[in-house]
Amino acid sequence: MTRLLLLEGNTAPKRARAHELGVRTSSEIYIEAIAAHYPDISLDVLNGADEGEAIPGGRTWSDYAGFVVTGSALHAYDAEFAVTNQIELLKQAAEAGLPIFGSCWGLQIAAVAAGGEVAFNPKGREVGFARKILLNDAGRAHPMFKGKAAVFDAPCIHYDEVIRLPDSATLLASNAHSEIQAAVIPLANSEVWAVQYHPEFDLGQLVQLYTLYAEDMVTQGFFADMAELVAYREKLEALAADPANAGLAWQLGVDEDVLEDRTRRAEILAWIEAKVLDR
């Protein structure tokens, strides 16, 4: 049986708060995204932000064909246990030679683990959709992007960004908000395929984010008031229920790179096919 270990990036209180609001945790989103295409892959979750947590079921690194670092509301530059423990777990997975994929938080802690740097983005939060992500020459040639166009949009939410890649890393994609939107980062006996955006997200998750962070998004000027946010969120919710609604897609400025599941998740699927199933 092929088995993957997912690193849940959020703390227990953050996960509990998400569940109170009906929002899926980072690992739950990934489980749905991977299981939709590979139902025979077994998925375990390690709550790496929590003290006393261990690989589940008494398993070891050698029981897994790959390691996935999910999202988190933490900051990779903080020195608290919830952060440093996850960086250490990532290093352990790399020492064990596991193929590694990461989104958002995964890119950031991989960069830190390999000697790079993460900081708050002075442009503020990139949220909802990361627009016009552009593959460079290395990105267009890399197998992670075999299912993507040279320019695409993707679901996202982040305040922080990688401001300096490790010397050994290869930049693959950028956009106007964040120069480092995708990279390959060698680490110990492995390498991390990582993106700043969230290919695992669906439109339903964006609806949930606009619920979880509603007050912040009004305060930060993304919406004039709560009524405007709710109206936008309702359009997203309607499009999630009916992805073929061309009018709503046009109003929200999205197309198949977001609406088509296999295209949106192409980076994850490419990693599984190239690094996990051939392992």
Image (spheres, helix red, strand yellow):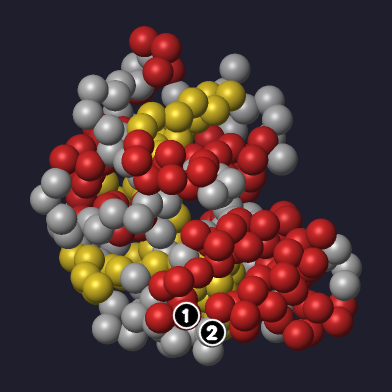
Q: What residue type is disc 2 on?
A: Asp
Q: Which residue was labeled with disc 1?
A: 218
Q: Give the x, y percent position of residue 153.
A: 60, 75
Residue 212 location (% of width, % of height): 49, 60
Residue 141, how many percent across, how many down?
A: 53, 67
Q: Residue at x 87, y 78 (%)?
A: 246
- Crowdedness of circle 1 by 10 Å Cα count: few (<14), some, many (20+)? some
Task: Using the image, determine if residue 239 lies above or below residue 103.
Answer: below
Picture quarter containing residue 67? top left
* Residue at x-position 68% and y-position 25%: 40
Residue furthest to the top in view is: 58
Left or right of 109? Residue 115 is left
Residue 57 horizontal side relative to residue 11, left or right: right
Amino acid carrying label 1: it is Val
- Along the viewing direction, whichever of 174 and 7 lies nearer the viewer: 7
Of helix, strand and loop, which one carries label 1?
A: helix
Q: Which residue is mark 2?
A: 225
Q: Give percent across and percent down for residue 250.
A: 78, 84
Name which residue lies at 52% across and 75% down. Answer: 130
- In the image, is 5 to the left or to the right of 140? left
Q: Picture quarter containing residue 59?
A: top left
Say above or below: 270 vs 263.
above
Q: Is residue 272 visible?
A: no
Tags 1 and 2 touching, CB below 8 Å = yes
Tell me how far mark 1 sits from mark 2, CA to CA.
6 Å
Nearer to the camera, 128 or 152: 128
Q: Which mark is residue 163?
A: none
